Image (cartoon, grey):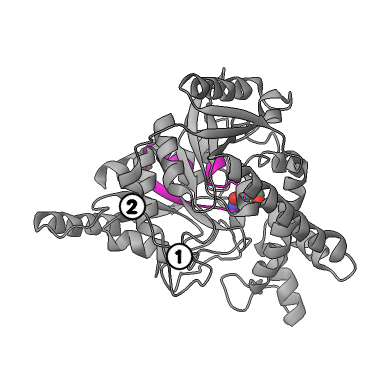
Amino acid sequence: VDHYLEKIEANKHLNAFVEVYTEEAKKAALAVDAKIANGTAGKLAGMVIGLKDVLSLTGHGLQAGSQILQNYTAPYTATAVQRLLDEDAIIIGRQNCDEFAMGSSNENSSFGPVLNAINNAKVPGGSSGGSAVAVQAGLCHASLGSDTGGSVRQPAAFCGVIGVKPSYGRISRYGLIAYASSFDCIGPITKSVADAALLLEVMSGADDFDSTVSERPVPAYTAGLEWKGKAKIGYIRSAVENEAIAPEIRRQTSEVLDRLRAEGHEVTAIDMPLLDSLLPTYYILTTAEASSNLSRFDGVRYGYRSPESVDLESMYKKTRTEGFGDEVRRRILLGTFVLSANYYDAYYTKAQRVRRLVREETNRFFEQFDFLISPVTPTTAFTLGEKTEDPLQMYLADIFTVQANVVGNPAVSIPNGLDDQGMPIGIQIMAPYFGEEKMLAFANYLT
Ligand code: GLN
């Protein structure tokens, strides 16, 4: 704990942490020491973990990177976090992120941007940027992020670390601030696949507080990390051929596919006719869900209330105008629009139908293949400010990551070399629904 506290202090400029629980972490470390001494320590004894600022920890500040939650304190602890604590993990602080987890660069936080530790002029990715940089820069052993459309995997790729998005319904969302409830997943960011497997194993499984969590038993992911046999791998042809993808990313992805072929795995190019529909579907459905989820921030129940309010309506308007940042307001407007009576069928219903088609197409794919391999992102970490004026450019960063959330399947991002400027490149492995065990074994084999 002392080591990490020193590193956090020395790397304050990265802006990875919003709050550090110094005294509490020190106390927790002593308590864990005592448990280790008397042989009662849990599976995560002494593992120092940071939490994205969307995960509840009783009595601690929680803001989702937003000013609308100023001075808000979590009244209970998220199930996933409680399970870590029950195994004697030590929580060291809460980490900076894009406001309400909306973003791909961590430039939408009301606490200011997070800097990539490899090159401070570059973004760390988002929305779990603080969580990825904290692991990248060694400010904690592991982090928990949330992934609605790539927010664990994309920053992990930009920072050269590992990020796992589990199957929808694997880990309880109780205590996670909702962005788009039918997409949101909690996921670990780590330096090794083994650590990710361990955290997943501890956090997964049924929970009385979240009825969308599966009752399926949780495999011992850490015991199954050795990959055996040959895999059937599909990859999206355009991901290694399309000129819009950075040449170094195409090169590194092709190298992995060649290596797999050479090692006797079956590697096949496929076409994904619905690829172009993924981002529109994702952004219609997530903004719709977000506009509904974020309606609770009304100036009455949580955090901030505008001091300028004179009546109920002005309180709503002023509180939400002052409390939310630009990107969050843009999405609330978009989501409200696609749900409005005149446009509901044209956008929302249609996107739901496309979601079903994507699910069917993905299921058909996994009848034939074990894994879908792709780049994580079309570019490596870009320069701060480069895309802030153009939200559509920013949304394109999610082209390869959103599919897993649209369908609910698990996917992992692992490091796959560097570009010419020394920035990390990631590769993504997507597996069938609840195929985490094999996916992690294969990721372990590839790292
Ligand atoms: N970048 C995507 C978005 O802004 C993903 C966010 C996420 O996974 N939380 O919606």
Q: Left or right: where does residue 254 sit relative to residue 280?
A: left
Residue 267 lies, in percent from the top left, at 57, 28
**Is 337 placed left or right of 357 in the picture?**
right
Which quadrant would residue 40 be assigned to in this image?
A: bottom left
Q: Residue 197: horizontal and vertical position, in percent?
A: 37, 47
> Depth-wise, is mark 2 or mark 1 nearer the camera?
2
* Residue depicted at x 78% and y 65%: 336
Task: Judge left or right: residue 184 versus residue 8.
Answer: right
The quadrant holding residue 36 is bottom left
Nearest the eye: 41 or 91: 41
Q: Which percent across, then down, holds residue 19?
A: 42, 54
Q: Is residue 239 above or below residue 7?
A: above
Asked if marks 2 and 1 touch (Cβ < 8 Å), the reply is no
The local secondary structure at tag 2 comes to: loop
Residue shown at the point (48%, 68%) measured from the top left: 174
Against 268, residue 84 (above or below) is below
Q: Residue at x 54, y 20 (%)?
A: 258
Question: Is residue 401 located in the magenta-colored stretch of the structure?
Answer: no
Q: Is residue 382 visible?
A: yes
Mark 1 surroundings within 10 Å by alpha-carbon count, few (fewer than 14), some (14 through 19), many (20 or more): many
Q: Which mark is residue 212?
A: none
- Residue 140 within the magenta-colored segment of the rendering: yes
Vertical side of 140 occupied by 62: above or below: below
Q: Nearer the viewer, residue 438 or 171?
A: 438
Which residues fall within the magenta stretch? 132-154
Which residue does the image show at 77% across and 46% down from the upper left?
Answer: 277
Report which residue position mark 2 lands on. Answer: 220
Residue reaching furthest to the right: 342
Residue ID for mark 1: 56
Look at label 2 and name its amino acid.
Ala
User: The C terminus appears in which quarter of the rendering?
Assistant: top left
The Cα atoms of the two marked residues, 2 and 1, are separated by: 26 Å
